[in-house]
Image (cartoon, rainbow, N blue to C red):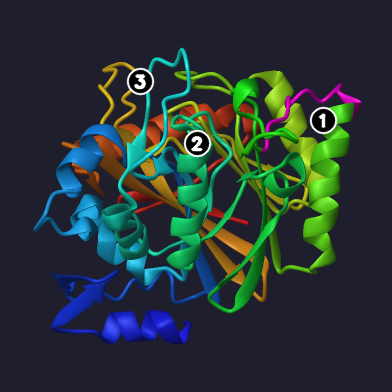
Amino acid sequence: MSGGRRRFLAAAGTAVLGGCTAPAAEPTAFEDHERYDTTIGFAGDTMLGRNVDGRYGRAGVDPATVWGDLQPRLQSLDGVCCNLECCLSRRGDRFPDRTYYFRADPEWAVPALEAGNVKFASLANNHMLDYGPAALRDTVDALEDGGIGYAGAGESPATAREPATVSVGDIDVAVVSFADHYSEYGATNDRPGTAYVEFDPESSDSRRIVGEAIDRANASEPDLLVASVHWGPNWVEYPDEDYVTFSHWLVDQGVDLVHGHSAHVVQGVERYGDGLILHDTGDIVDDYITKEKLRNDRSFLFEVGLESGSLEELRLVPVAIDDRAVSRADENAAAWLRETMRDRSNPFETTYERDGDDLVLSL
């Protein structure tokens, strides 16, 4: 167990999170984490804008409360990686002809990410340019000031495609990040933007662009190489064949873990070769209307246990979004999530053991 996690588990009294004072969680020993040198949490879309921003950006509100009773679990990990589904800024002009615009005030949003133990945020998605280049630059500056790693956006195509390397616990994690929507948000030589690519396995251009980023990431000889990808249509429970094929290609190029997001619902988990593919990790925080059949308000915290940099276990911790905050799922929601994930993982012949409310996959 890392020194940081020991200190958290031993803590008592008051914790200071990103400049905001909040009651410390009661010490809790998560014994399932202690078996591994490093445990990293992977979360889906983290949308802190709009009504979430309106609630937690007010004076006197503790940003940490956006994580509800899940926060001790997040803090017990060595770090968390998520997709940041909004820009962090108080300025900028709306990109024309968009239905939804997501922007959060960095004054509370960065402390919230810190309180959630976020070490890396993917910026390659279809909301990073909602308020134009100024807000994108503010996002990058805010994350850098908070010591949070990022990839997937930048001043030019080259910088947007540049991998990030972050230290999580005792290992170095390299992350490449790409999105397949919107093409209009893609960085150009004249304007900042995202790392846009079409995830077409037959496209030699797509394979070249992503392959070059993977090669640059591998050059740093990381302990773990992650591809954090914002792909596919919304509200789809199973990935299209092209995305499955492209995920296999990513692993064949040396990616250890594919961190998928975009659908707003969890999709299946696949063990392919030496890699682990989380086809879609759903949503972790948002203010979206719940689709009753799809239950986009229910997801998992995907915890990956590593030993000497080697993938050993995936633990799926059921969570639910309620009234613009995330929390541990109740008994009924956890049961629904376990059944749903088993069904959605069946096409990949992935089977789980149950451990309390969690699902566990030995790797």
Look at the image and give the residue range highlighted in magenta.
195-204
Quadrant holding the C terminus? bottom right
Residue drawn 43% across and 66% down? 146
Secondary-structure class at tag 3: loop
Marks 3 & 2, CB-CB < 8 Å contact: no
Residue 39: x and y, percent? Answer: 50, 67
- Give neighbour class at mark 3: few <14, some 14-19, many 20+ (Cα, 10 Å): some
Q: Compared with residue 363, is residue 294 higher up or lower down, i.e. above or below?
A: above
Q: Nearer the viewer, mark 2 or mark 1?
A: 2
Residue 343: x and y, percent? Answer: 48, 27
Q: Nearer the viewer, mark 3 or mark 2?
A: 2
Hey, what amino acid is under mark 2? Met
Indicate yes or no whether the magenta region holds residue 122.
no
Q: Which disc, if any, is residue 78?
A: none
Residue 248: x and y, percent? Answer: 77, 37
What residue is disc 3 on? 294
Residue 360: in sight, yes or no?
Answer: no
Q: CA distance from mark 2 to mark 1?
A: 21 Å
What residue is disc 1 on? 206
